[in-house]
Amino acid sequence: MSSWLITGAGGLLGTELRNLLPAHSTTALSREILDITDATATADAIALLRPSVVVNCAAWTDVDSAEAHESAARAVNATAVRGLARACRRGRIRLLHISTDYVFDGTGHTPYAEGDQPEPRTAYGRTKLAGERAALAEHPAGTTVVRTAWLYGPGGRNFVHTMTERARTGEPVAVVDDQHGQPTWARDVAERLLTLGTGPARPGIFHATAGGRATWYELAREVYQLTGADPALVTPIPSVALNRPAPRPAWSVLGHEGWHATGLAPLRHWRTALHDAFRTIPSFHDTGHTPIAPRSPACVR
Ligand SMILES: NC(=O)c1ccc[n+]([C@@H]2O[C@H](COP(=O)([O-])OP(=O)(O)OC[C@H]3O[C@@H](n4cnc5c(N)ncnc54)[C@H](OP(=O)(O)O)[C@@H]3O)[C@@H](O)[C@H]2O)c1
């Protein structure tokens, strides 16, 4: 039976994974308990716990602030990952390392394949790509890089959560309609991590994003509909209207050939998963709030 160590366990994905894995064989360490930039503490924790699988959910995930703090982001997203991978190789431990669609330039028109050339355009993307490469170089036989994107779930702030709250109060919202991606329930990713951690080792890269694609605007309308609010309260705007420090990829659609090639099922369609999430997650389907009078639109994404 596998024993698991989750780093960055206090975040959105770490929380979903912690809820899914068997408690008796899982150690979930949040940043307060293990800061992965402390290489000695990380190596000691791995040597002491001797898990069969480490899932690294820890990351500097603030895309905009990474632009001004790239070396600090690199310390978490790349340097620490190298140390983690080294400790895993020494202990013959499998490493599932989570990465991102931001490793690509976001200018494509067809889904990015696992083997496509990365070309990050942001500090966050550069540091995450460096982390992928460091892990695969340090521990090639035991590292699986799992790229995901557009995550939502109950364990933290995310777009679906924000839209749900706005829909409940009947708030009009302006949302960008020129970025395409794959809204992905973190629980679906957690389930694939469980598969990757328990079957035969599958070193390399997998894309753990939902099927289909949508814009943030389309996703927001779907959330308003599911919450019982009028989707017409959601209006489309272009990305340039938000003027973010880090450029957002216009095309964040990932291909899923890695799953097919290894005989595993890719994640389900984003709309199917979203409807399921609204049935399952109490904070999403709770309709205890009464819609109030519309205000002027907030701009989102
Ligand atoms: N959310 C998305 O849409 C998305 C999209 C693409 C890829 N990903 C990737 O998915 C993975 C999980 O992200 P998430 O969505 O769960 O983000 P998250 O909610 O921000 O979780 C990241 C966690 O890492 C922790 N952390 C930061 N620095 C750390 C350190 N030095 N040592 C230990 N823990 C540290 C954070 O703690 P603090 O909160 O205390 O800082 C946080 O709990 C990341 O690799 C991310 O790059 C996420």
Image (cartoon, rainbow, N blue to C red):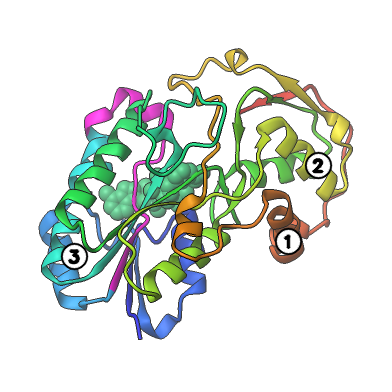
Which residue sits at x=73%, y=56%? 272
In three-dimensional space, the C-alpha distance between marks 2 and 3, rounded to whole angstroms, equals 44 Å
Nearest to N terminus: mark 2 or mark 3:
3
Circle 3 sits on which residue? Answer: 88
Q: Does the magenta-highlighted stretch encompass residue 215?
A: no
In three-dimensional space, the C-alpha distance between marks 1 and 3, rounded to whole angstroms, equals 35 Å
Q: Name the side, left or right, on which 47 lies relative to 191.
A: left
Q: Quadrant of residue 144?
A: bottom left
Q: Circle 3 sits in a helix, a strand or a loop, which is it?
A: helix
The answer to whether residue 37 is visible is: no
Circle 2 sits on which residue? Answer: 224
Q: Name the side, left or right, on which 236 lies relative to 87.
A: right
- Percent coordinates x, y for residue 82 in the rendering: 17, 50
Q: Circle 2 sits in a helix, a strand or a loop, which is it?
A: helix
Q: Which residues are magenta?
A: 53-71
- Percent coordinates x, y for residue 200 in the rendering: 35, 73
- Percent coordinates x, y for residue 261 in the rendering: 46, 58
Vertical placement of 19 versus 177: above or below? below
Pointer 3 residue Cβ closer than 8 Å to ligand 1: no
Q: Quadrant of the N terminus?
A: bottom left
Which residue sits at x=79%, y=22%? 296
Circle 1 sits on which residue? Answer: 276
